[in-house]
Structures are given as structure tokens and as C-alpha cells.
Image (spheres, grey):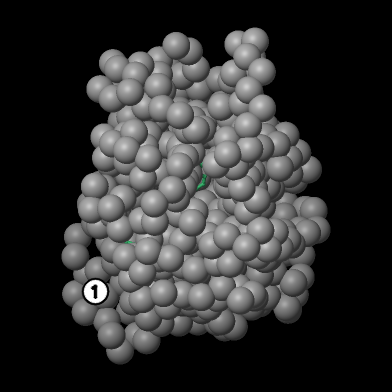
Amino acid sequence: MNGDPTDAQDIIPRVDKLARSVSNSWNSLSTSPSLAFHPPQLRRPSTVTKPLKPFETKNIKVLLLENVNKTGQDLLREQGYIVEALKTSLPEDQLIEKIRDVHVVGIRSKTRLTAKVLREARNLIVIGAFCIGTNQVDLEFAAENGITVFNSPFSNSRSVAELTIAEIIMLSRQAGDRSNELHNGTWNKVSAGCWEVRGKTLGIIGYGHIGSQLSVLAETMGMGVVYYDVLTMMAMGTARQLPSLEKVLAEADFITLHVPELPETKNMIGEKQFSQMKDGSYLINNSRGTVVDIPSLINASRSGKLAGAALDVYPNEPGGNGDYFNNDLNTWTTDLRSLKNIILTPHIGGSTEEAQSAIGAEVGHALVSYVNEGSTTGAVNMPEVSVRTTEPNLARVLFIHQNVPGVLRKVNTILADYNIERQKSESRGKVAYLMLEVSGAGEQEIATLYKELESVQACIRTRVLY
Ligand SMILES: NC(=O)c1ccc[n+]([C@@H]2O[C@H](COP(=O)([O-])OP(=O)(O)OC[C@H]3O[C@@H](n4cnc5c(N)ncnc54)[C@H](O)[C@@H]3O)[C@@H](O)[C@H]2O)c1
């Protein structure tokens, strides 16, 4: 969609929308922040350069589950929101009971926000997933009901890169095995098959957030770096992009995987790829468990083709901590555990205090920016819209609507007598988001404007900040 009224066509009748009370009320939730907003240092800078007029931020209720990091909690409390923070997730019935009341919910990976739960969330305007993935949220249902979702996909990149560097050195010194032996009382001082990493070649598969950080760290240790990515990526330092996976496998002493989980990356390292690697090379997988065919890895390790491996991720992973890493989980687990020079870690690549804090800050800022300004920059399920404001006495209208023909014609008719200072519209799938600012409107006019916009058939949600 765009802001051109000449695009207007017939309006398709609106689908039933959820009954919403506070969040649809122009004069309760939908007003502007009382506290000066400090721009985040992360990926979502504030787009508002003037503070909008004061409003009661203490009306905004926030439910945080699963022990959301304190940095995130503090950011929301500083805004004056009423924050209830619980250490665990909630059973569905209790979740439904609590979520009815709140405007903002913060979760991590265990809370499932299904359509059934969200249907009850009558006041909810935004979800903060204080984690990487968003599989636990019905994103489409949320979007179609005007609920924006934010997450933090890259806050732990450095943590993964550092773990990988540690593993490169530990593997090349067989330090995991020596440590295990000594834990069992065996002194085994050897140098055969142990190497410095200086002068060796690291092959990075997937040169994104993690792969490129790793590239810099590896070069500072004196390693040469080659990489393969489906996209042409600018090299860091003196690293070299090679045209194929095979070429990287043939050249590198250490191969490390940093690709996403996709149909194309499933078992991308299998029997054929192990045969293309140098004899005595090392493999590290801190990406996703489906990327490596583990039975082939077991064979390559037993045959001596691989001198060592480190795995942080597995095709099936336990839901909680405990004695679950056995053949019930994956049929080859016992064989894997029996291999020499293999470091096995329980998906801790991104699990550091710094990463948790960065996630808290990033998602916290995104929630504040959405509640106070309507900015959807970085949202997972909404069109990305933000507007920069510099002038006083403006009312900002946030209009989430079905992405169907004719809506903007209707909106522009409603706005015909207002002075529109700026407007921006984006669509994503079935949902579109219009943000605009009008000048010179008094409280009564804003109330009328709100009501008229809410009566547009394709309206999903209207908020007015002033
Ligand atoms: N172990 C952990 O705790 C942990 C933590 C964070 C991320 N991860 C995982 O690490 C992986 C990388 O994360 P990221 O943040 O660097 O992702 P990213 O999206 O920034 O980078 C991934 C890169 O892989 C490339 N790519 C995609 N398909 C490819 C293919 N078939 N062959 C070669 N390159 C391909 C992409 O072009 C991109 O440059 C992801 O799978 C992520 O889930 C694991």
C-alpha cells in the first residue's frame, strides 16, 4: 500500500476483530510518553526527536514471564509502566487469565502464545520475545489482530564467536580429552597431534553476524580465513570468500558452520563433504543441529579423517536440564559420546550474561519505542514504519489495517479537513500499517478522528499519540 488516494478501490468487508478495550481507546493507552526517551545503542534508534505531550504511562500494564533479564525489566519500569515480572512461564489457563489484562507481554522460549491464548488478550498491543526465535508465537494471528512482535536475533553473536575460538584451540590441543583423563585420575602428557592454531586456515561456512565476527577474532590469532556464503559478503581483514563449499572444505584445517536452519542447509555436511575435507581436519557446529549428518561425522572421526569436532547443537535437544543426552534422544548418542577429541556442549553458544543483557536492552527499547511512538522498526510480523518528528502540537495516528484495496481512500476522506504533516504506509502480507501526523487538532477532534478511523471496515487497530 502507499499513501496515494488515487490507488483506492472497493473495500472488502472486515473480518471479525477481537474485542479490545483499553488499547483501542485514544485517551487512555494511546498517548505519548512522559519521560524523555533515550535512543537505544542497538539497532532501533528512536525516531522521535521531540518528546510528545505527557501522558499516564502508569496505565500501561506489562507482564514479563520466564525471568526476563533485569536490563529489560528496568527499561520498562523506568517508563512508569506497571510491570509484573514472574520467574517462570505459566500454564495455559493461568496465562490466559493474566494476559487478558495487559498491554505488553514479555516472554522467552517456553511460553507458547498460540491463537487460543492471544484471542483472549484483549488489551495486548505488543509482544517482546526476549530471545532469538519466535516459533513459540503465532505471528500471523498476532499481526492480523494488531499485535506487534519483537525479538532479538543477533544479540548473542559475539558469545557464539568467542566459544568457537575457544573450541578451535581446545581441539587442536586435545585439551578436552586431557581434561577428561585427568578428572578420571590419568596423567597423559602428550604432544603428538597437538598444534598451535597460528598459521592454520579457518574455513567459515555462513559469513553472517557470527561468521564475520569470528573471522576477525581468528585473524588476530594468526589464522588465515577463507569462507563460503550463498551471498557475496564483504571480507573482514584479509579473509577470502571462495566460490563453493567444496573449495573451502579442501583448503581449511578447521571448518566452522554458521548457517541458518533451512531445507538447503539440512545435512549440508555429510559423507561426501567429509571426504572433501583435508585429512586430520576439525569440524565445529555451533549453528543448528540439522546442518551436520551425525552418523557421517561419527564415521569420519573413527576413520581418523577428522582429528576432532565440537558440537553445541543437535537434531533433537532435551526440553530441560537433566540426564537426557542418550539414545532415546538421538539413536547415535552413545556412539557420539564415545569419540575421541570431541567437545560436546548443551547449546550454550549464545548463553552468556552479556548476551542476556543485550537481549533485554534491545527488546526493552523496542517495546518502549512501540508503545510510546508506534515505531515498528525491527518487528518480526508487522510492516516496518517509523516517522521522525520535530514539531510541537502534533497528533500521531497509528492505524493498523487489513491490506485490502480502498482503505487509504476512506482514511483520506476522514482526514480531509486535517492538516497532515507527514504520513507513511507499509504493508506486509495481509496487514498494512499507516502512520501519520496531523497538526492543530484539539482533544475533541482527536477523539472524533479516532472514532471515525475505528469505524473503517478494514481497521484492525487505531492508536493516537498526542
Ligand atoms: N549455538 C547457539 O547458541 C547459537 C546462538 C546464536 C545463533 N546460532 C545459530 O547460528 C547460525 C548463524 O547465526 P547468525 O546470527 O550468524 O546468522 P546470519 O543470518 O547473520 O548469517 C547466516 C549466513 O549464512 C548464509 N547462508 C545461508 N544459507 C547458506 C548456505 N546454504 N550456504 C552458505 N551460507 C549460507 C547467509 O547468507 C548468512 O550470511 C544460525 O543457525 C543461528 O540459529 C546458534
The residue located at (26%, 48%) in the rendering is 270
The residue located at (37%, 40%) in the rendering is 304
The residue located at (58%, 30%) in the rendering is 176
Residue 43 in the image: above or below residue 105: below
User: From where the camera sits, is residue 12 visible?
Assistant: yes
Image quarter of the C terminus: bottom right
User: From where the camera sits, is residue 260 visible?
Assistant: no
Please state which of residues 322 and 235 is positioned toward the viewer in this rendering: 235
Helix, strand or loop at label 1? It is loop
Report the number of numbered marks: 1
How far from the left and from the top, in percent, is residue 156?
A: 60, 48
User: Ligand 1 lies in which image quarter?
Assistant: bottom left
Q: Which residue is mark 1?
A: 405
How far from the left and from the top, in percent, is residue 342?
A: 48, 33
Residue 297 in the image: above or below residue 162: above
Residue 380 in the image: above or below residue 426: above
Horizontal side of 95 relative to 105 (left or right) equals left
How far from the left and from the top, in percent, is residue 262?
A: 29, 53
How far from the left and from the top, in percent, is residue 351?
A: 60, 36
Image quarter of the N terminus: bottom left
Horizontal side of 300 relative to 221 (left or right) equals left
Horizontal side of 236 relative to 111 (left or right) equals right
Residue 395 in the image: above or below residue 348: below
Binning the other alpha carbons within 10 Å of mark 1 as few (below 14), some (14 to 19) or many (20 upward) gives some
Q: Classify residue 442 by image quadrant.
A: bottom right
Residue placed farthest to the bottom in the image? 6
The residue located at (68%, 63%) in the rendering is 222
Instruction: Give, as a three-letter code, the residue at label 1.
Output: Pro
- Whether disc 1's CB lies below 8 Å from ligand 1 is answered no
Please state which of residues 245 and 427 is positioned toward the viewer in this rendering: 245
Horizontal side of 348 relative to 388 (left or right) equals left
